[in-house]
Amino acid sequence: MAEDSLLDHALVRLDEATAHLNIDPDVIEKLKFPRETTKVRLMIRMDDGSRKSFLAWRCRYDDTRGPTKGGIRFHPDSTDDEVETLAFWMTFKCAVMNLPYGGGKGAVQVDPRKLSKAELERLSRAYIQAFARIIGPDRDIPAPDVYTNSMIMGWMADEYAQIVGHAEPAVITGKPIALGGSLGRGDATARGGYYLVRHLAEDLGLGNPMRVAVQGFGNAGQHIAQLLAADGHKIVAVSDSEGAVRADAGLRVDLLMEAKANGRSVISTAGQAGHEILPASELVGVDCDLLVPAALENMIHERNAHSVKAKLVLELANGPVTPEADKILAANDVVILPDILANAGGVTVSYFEWVQNRQGFYWTVREIHERLQAIMEAEGRAIWNISKEKGITMRTAAYVHALGRLADAIEAHGTQSFFTS
Ligand code: GLU
């Protein structure tokens, strides 16, 4: 299936779940296509006076359960197919967590590391100028994703406010605290995954301490390493795009984070005895108990899935394991905590941010953590029970769980005409 699109791969998971539920085929048909994808060309002035243009998208995949929600990615490899697939995953992720949202996603095809800060700001503002008609607090609510952050969300919120003529903080989440961002949004993706692993640790038969390998050392990767290390677990390997560093005795997470904060690769920390540098591609095969893919899609595939030694995979990235690799890992008794559950802490705290913006009443970080933990544990437990009852993987169980909620909403809207809002 190598020539199939990423969305075709993603839809395999929908088909697998459909087999375990009695659902109107019209509902499944609706979920197989994005509702609308808008593609534009953004043109900005570069610092040297030249102009440059960038392809950009916003996909609203399905809005049956509420306004579409999902991040904006800045990445040189972004495509129509990738944006639509990420928006499909957001649809299921929001349903898994029972958030009152549909799924959406945006992207700009750009390597933001090659832009100056002023160019990055112009590009972020141009994105909102292009998509201001599409987004809105009751319509479509962007947030950060790969290579975007709170600073970019701040510029975007400001541009939107200038266009509509008043502050509208609920149009975008992941904002700086000073502009109505929520406490606890920064580490929310990792923290959600951390609560999930902790809650299921006994059921999964996890040892203590665990040896952990983290693939990708951006926002999610850094925070999961920090949270697990603080509980006494050993971070035995981490990677970024330049390579991997491994140390059986455990790596110093503070030094790794300091390197990233200074624009250096994690491999620059490998000076000490017992440290070994590996190609980034070897991270997934490192000897460990817990493997955390926290980078991009398709990192564990049919060619490297056999090398996985971990007994548990926590998918903090979206789509890191292909359907073929799922089968290999299942045959080797590797449990996967799937993306649409494992990394849903990010969008859940985004939801809290949107609620706080709309109320104009702000919560303490303790309230944020407690509410996030309660939702992660409840939905994680429900999916664990479905998986045990039906004898299916956690991934298929998560899709079954979400699909039941999506089907209820689609049927309640009526299935005679779908393009309704
Ligand atoms: N980009 C994150 C995700 O893939 C967060 C989305 C959001 O907060 O809306 O889940």
Image (tube, helix red, strand yellow):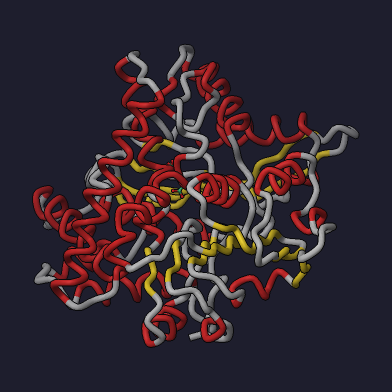
Residue in the picture at 57% in, 58% down: 234
Residue in the picture at 71% in, 49% down: 256
Which quadrant of the figure shows ligand 1? top left
Examine the rendering and report whether any part of residue 39 can be seen.
Answer: no
For the C terminus, the quadrant is top left
Quadrant in which residue 372 is drawn: top left
Identity of the residue furthest to the right in this view: 48
Residue in the picture at 16% in, 59% down: 404
Examine the rendering and report whether any part of residue 384 can be seen.
Answer: yes
Quadrant in which residue 328 is drawn: bottom left
Asked if residue 301 is positioned above or below residue 147 in the image, the reply reads below
* Residue 386 image position (x, y, % from top left): 17, 66
Asked if residue 218 is positioned above or below residue 297 in the image, the reply reads above
* Residue 341 image position (x, y, % from top left): 34, 56
Is 301 left or right of 87, judged from the image as shown? right
Observer-nearest residue: 285 or 101? 285
Is 309 left or right of 357, judged from the image as shown? right
* Residue 403 image position (x, y, % from top left): 21, 61
Asked if residue 174 is positioned above or below residue 419 in the image, the reply reads above
Is 168 left or right of 269, judged from the image as shown? left
Residue in the picture at 70% in, 31% down: 122
Observer-nearest residue: 12 or 59? 12
